[in-house]
Image (cartoon, rainbow, N blue to C red):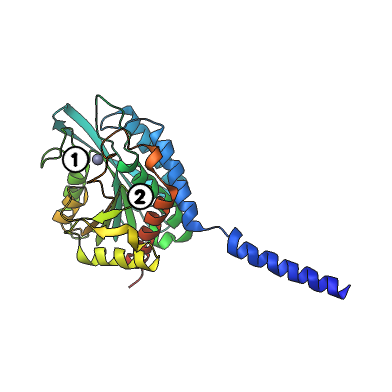
Amino acid sequence: MKSNRYLLALLLTAAVTAFWFFGRPNSTNQLGNSANALTSEILALGPRPPGSVALNQVRSLLSKELVASGWVVELQEFERDTSVGKIKFANLRARFKGKDQDPWKRKIDGLLCAHVDSKLYKDKVFLGADDAASACAAIVVIAKHLANENPEQASKLELVFFDGEEAFAQSMTTLDGLYGSRHYANTWRTRDDKPKFGILLDMIGHEKLSIRIPSDSPKHLAELMFSVAKKQNVQSHFDTALGTIMDDHVPLNLIGIPTLDIIGDFTRSKWWHTPGDNSDIISPESLSISIGVTLGMLDDLLAEK
Ligand SMILES: [Zn+2]
């Protein structure tokens, strides 16, 4: 009997050890899977150019997910004359409710943002899966994770989903494109309680993940990203682009909020701004890597100092 009891104890220990190694939930992988699923939900609503019904539906979907985990949302609406007529734009902002005070009166430390619109094409179906539905999904997943695991950090952040990043003409100009981020940055311009940093995510879920940050990125944020990526052993996916990049970080940097654009390499791709930018190119593993590094950076940037 005694030896049977020993055998039982041995088996139990082995089972517990096996569970610890193989069965324990890998939380970053789970976050990647969740972001992948939410990307698909966004894409199911169809192309979402500025002013479209689908874009409103996507903002509602993101809002519903955020509100369910304790975030409050607000639309920042504005109108602009564009080459396709007068367009009504709306940035979606979110802050963690917390317990203390009106979240919109709270001083915040950082911004986490992405663009929610997809580029308007009249002659093809363009879904913008990685440009930038995947980034929006990743932000919602990060927000839910922080709400549960680290509400302190959540309450120091503002999430922004920019409208109108894409130009209506084929290429971006100083007047066409970045509509939402230019408008949003202007609201901070004269304030002295600006957030200390911004992180912009764009094209961060491609199956061949190759992040190439702009060459003029804020140095301390770039160094932090590389050191976190190295710590997480995913540094092979992160590098610096040869030049600067026009994206939503530019208006924020111009008004004094140092913002890092964590952006995938689109320069030599066949999928960028084509119908090939669909769910087929999105990978949960890539999303896990991008989410893991973003969370690692937030952990450092939002720590009590
Ligand atoms: Zn684009």
Query: Quarter holding the N terminus?
Result: bottom right
Say which residue appears at 20% left-offset and 47% top-offset.
Answer: 247
- 179 or 278, nearer to the observer: 278
Q: Is residue 61 visible?
A: no
Local crowd at mark 1 within 10 Å, few (<14), some, or many (≥20)? many
Q: Earlier in the sequence, mark 2 or mark 1?
A: 1
Q: For this view, does 40 lie left or right of residue 1?
A: left
Say which residue appears at 79% left-offset and 68% top-offset.
Answer: 8
Amino acid type, mark 2? Lys
Q: For this view, does 150 lie left or right of residue 108?
A: right
Q: In terms of secondary structure, where does tag 2 sit?
A: loop
Say which residue appears at 74% left-offset and 71% top-offset.
Answer: 10
**Residue where numbered disc 1 is placed:** 179
Residue 69 x, y percent position in the rendering = 46, 49
- Rendered view: 198 above or below 83: below
Q: For this view, does 198 lie left or right of residue 246?
A: right
- Rendered view: 296 above or below 52: below
Residue that protrudes farthest toward the top in the picture: 123
Asked if the residue at label 2 sits under 8 Å from ligand 1, the reply is no
Amino acid type, mark 1? Tyr
Say which residue appears at 39% left-offset and 51% top-offset.
Answer: 286
- 31 or 301, nearer to the observer: 31
Q: Real-space Cα distance between discs 2 and 1?
A: 29 Å
**Residue where numbered disc 2 is placed:** 208
Residue that protrudes farthest toward the left in the picture: 174
